Image: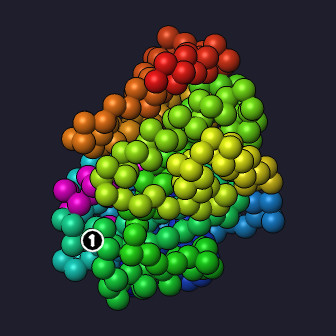
Amino acid sequence: MKRILVWGAGAIGGTVAAHLSRARKSPTLVDVNAAHLDAINRDGLRISSPDGEFTERLTALAPEQVSGVFDVIFLAVKATHTEIALERAREFLTPDGCVVSLQNGLCEIGIAELVGRERTVGAFINFGADYVEPGHLLFANRGVVIIGEIDGLMRPRTQRIVELLRPFEPDAATTDNIWGYLWGKTAYSSLLKAEALSDQTMVDFIGDPDLREVHVKLVRELLAVARAEGVEPLGFNGFDPRAFERDDEAAYANLADMAEFYRPSAKTHSSAWRDIAIFGQKTDAPAQLTPVFAIAEKHGLQVPISRKLVQLIENLEAGRAKQGSSLVAELAKEAMAS
């Protein structure tokens, strides 16, 4: 896998690409943010972290500037932009190449429809990163990085992708249950999406004792969909799905563990929160949860809390509401009624 394309130069893609470039893997970086590209090409891509910072010079292009073919494409755009990005990116994929989703949600489903299941590789990522300004990203904390084939088989390319990513995350690993991680993250990240309704940090929101019953109901709702789909949800970085499924006290204790994972992180708010509060733009929460809703319907399951969450986020995006306790209270009302 000598030719590497990272499509999306934001917090996730840019951070990974900078580390790969630093390890002499020579990735090509693609984005649509002209100011970001100009800054990278002029001054390099600056990566700040609690451990220090570095600036990496690498090739950064707009989509219309890309040429040639690539053995692996790391797709690092928001779930909302998966289809439009792949319509452009897939023409640069070699016949035996693959697309690896460095995204949140169940994006592998849509990717497989666009490029074929045999050219789709799943990835689970849980490191923290933020876009600070053009040419500058914050790598806030390390987190689990797992690669797995969407059919559960282990192939030579699976391990090659892991080895490719180890300059970024030394503990990157393979799995034969990538869907377990993706569904686990879907349930877990529902709390990060819900934090976007509030004026609290992730640590305070997840650890808020007045909201723990709401949190547990929300997470359980999504874990039930995973179970109906025949998936064993997996835990990571303080999150244990089995604790939520066991009993309330175990779930409450696990919420405290989840909050503690974020306590030392330089990333204080979720990406959804930052989209609304900092950038005034739409989140990809609806795009991440829409496939979940379809799967729930297939199994005859109701997901009223998750649907209410999306509705409230869309109200924020449209300017019909403001972040704060009153909006969280609306979600809590739905949860208590379920």
What residue is at 20 percent from the left and 57 percent from the top?
Answer: 114
Q: Say what amino acid the circle numbered 1 marks.
A: Asp
Dividing the picture into quadrants, the one containing residue 152 is: bottom left
Residue 187 visible in the snapshot? yes
What span is in magenta?
99-115
- Seen at 40% across and 67% down, the residue is 178
Return the x and y of residue 267 as percentages of the image width and height. 71, 48
Q: Foreground residue, 28 or 322?
A: 322
Q: Is residue 210 toward the left or the right of residue 168 in the image? A: right
List x then y, in percent, for residue 127.
Answer: 61, 59
Q: In this orientation, which residue lies closer to the viewer: 337 or 328?
A: 337
State the residue at coordinates (53%, 45%): 189
Q: Residue at x 46, y 28 (%)?
A: 305
Q: Residue furthest front?
A: 247
- Pointer 1 residue: 151
Q: Secondary structure at mark 1?
A: loop
Q: Quick check: 211 left or right of 93? A: right
20 relative to 112, above or below: below
In this view, the residue in front, 54 or 82, is 82
Residue 237: quarter of image:
bottom right
